[in-house]
């Protein structure tokens, strides 16, 4: 049985004032039947990890591939762990675009994260042009093959399928399109890692998940939860998504 995961990606949003949202989420979802993860900006990670106690896991939004050294402005996986993180998001499309991160970069960062004891949420997804050209599955196959290191286990690997055109736009693929990609990812993981890892790694959907569409998305096969951007910033939006996942 895969433990369902409701993950929030705060991106470059949130200061100390937003910790009140975290306390509300913790109070509301003590003993939740699903795992809850919040990935705040690095400046909040330690405070949020303390505020979240054991009710919520925390994660970084990126890490460097090196353990330490002359990399001004970067943060290592070990530093994220030291600040209380147990996860790190890697290869988000905004990082692939803003920082020109390649699949190889993502794989090297993931190796470093695993070595530091973190679980990895590796993001994959196609552009609208790629979908319109019927290239979605080829793009996803390439990103999976290139971005996931060999050292993952069923417990440490989470894949987030995030169609780039659905992120922050209010548009989502049809449920059939989500199901097609999630089933495809599951079969690729089983092919490469065998049924143990392949069946126990979780696959999240991400891209404009909201309280109003969460339940139908969570009903799709091989959707084990969501990576949520905008709607994870407010407890009033994130809580109904968590509740929908609990009921799924
Ligand atoms: C994201 O950036 O990971 C994301 C899914 O954003 P949103 O939910 O705002 O579309």
Image: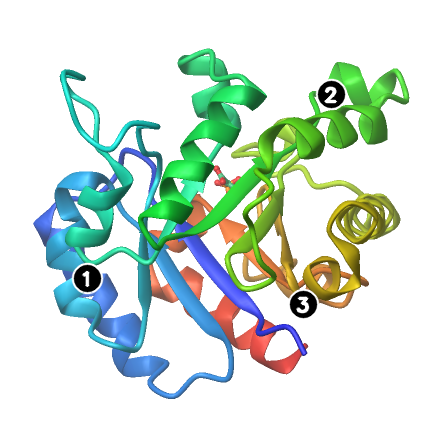
In which quadrant of the rendered image does the C terminus lie? bottom right
141 up-or-down from 26: above or below:
above
Query: What is the spatial separation of the Cα atoms under label 1 and label 3, in whole angstroms?
Result: 28 Å
* Label 2 vs 3, first from the N-terminus: 2
* Label 1 vs 2, first from the N-terminus: 1
Q: Who's the residue at 47% across and 17% down the image?
A: 101
Q: Nearer the viewer, residue 40 or 232?
A: 40
148 up-or-down from 51: above or below:
above
Disc 1, disc 3: CB below 8 Å? no
Give the residue pinned by disc 1.
Answer: 49
Query: For disc 2, does the CB lie below 8 Å from ligand 1?
Result: no
Query: For disc 3, does the CB lie below 8 Å from ligand 1?
Result: no
When asked about the image quadrant of residue 236, the answer is bottom left
Apparent side of residue 186 relative to residue 51 in the rendered image (left or right) = right
How dense is the environment of label 2, judged by Cα within 10 Å: few (below 14), some, or many (20 and up)?
A: some
Give the residue pinned by disc 2.
Answer: 128
SS for tag 3? helix
Give the residue pinned by disc 3.
Answer: 215
Q: Who's the residue at 22% across and 69% down the image?
A: 52
């Amino acid at each position: 049985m895969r433990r369902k995961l409701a993950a929030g990606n705060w991106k470059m949003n949130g200061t100390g004032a937003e910790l009140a949202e975290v306390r509300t989420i913790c109070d509301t979802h003590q003993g939740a039947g699903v795992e809850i993860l919040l990935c705040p900006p690095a400046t909040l990670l330690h405070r949020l990890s303390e505020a979240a106690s054991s009710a919520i896991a925390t994660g970084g939004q990126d890490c460097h591939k090196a353990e330490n050294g002359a990399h001004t402005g970067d943060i290592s996986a070990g530093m994220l762990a030291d600040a209380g993180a147990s996860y790190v998001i890697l290869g988000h499309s905004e990082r692939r675009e803003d920082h020109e991160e390649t699949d190889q970069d993502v794989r090297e960062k993931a190796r470093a994260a695993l070595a530091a004891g973190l679980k990895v949420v590796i993001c994959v997804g196609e552009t609208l042009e790629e979908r319109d050209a019927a290239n979605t599955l080829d793009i996803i196959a390439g990103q999976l093959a290139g971005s996931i290191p060999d050292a993952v286990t069923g417990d440490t690997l989470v894949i987030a399928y995030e169609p780039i055109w659905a992120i922050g736009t209010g548009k989502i693929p049809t449920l059939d399109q989500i199901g097609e990609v999630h089933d495809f990812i599951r079969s690729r993981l089983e092919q490469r890692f065998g049924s143990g890892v392949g069946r126990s790694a979780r696959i999240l959907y991400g891209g404009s998940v909201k309280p109003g569409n969460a339940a139908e998305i969570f009903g799709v096969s091989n959707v084990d939860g969501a990576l949520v951007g905008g709607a994870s910033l407010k407890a009033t939006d994130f809580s109904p998504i968590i509740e929908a996942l609990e009921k799924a």
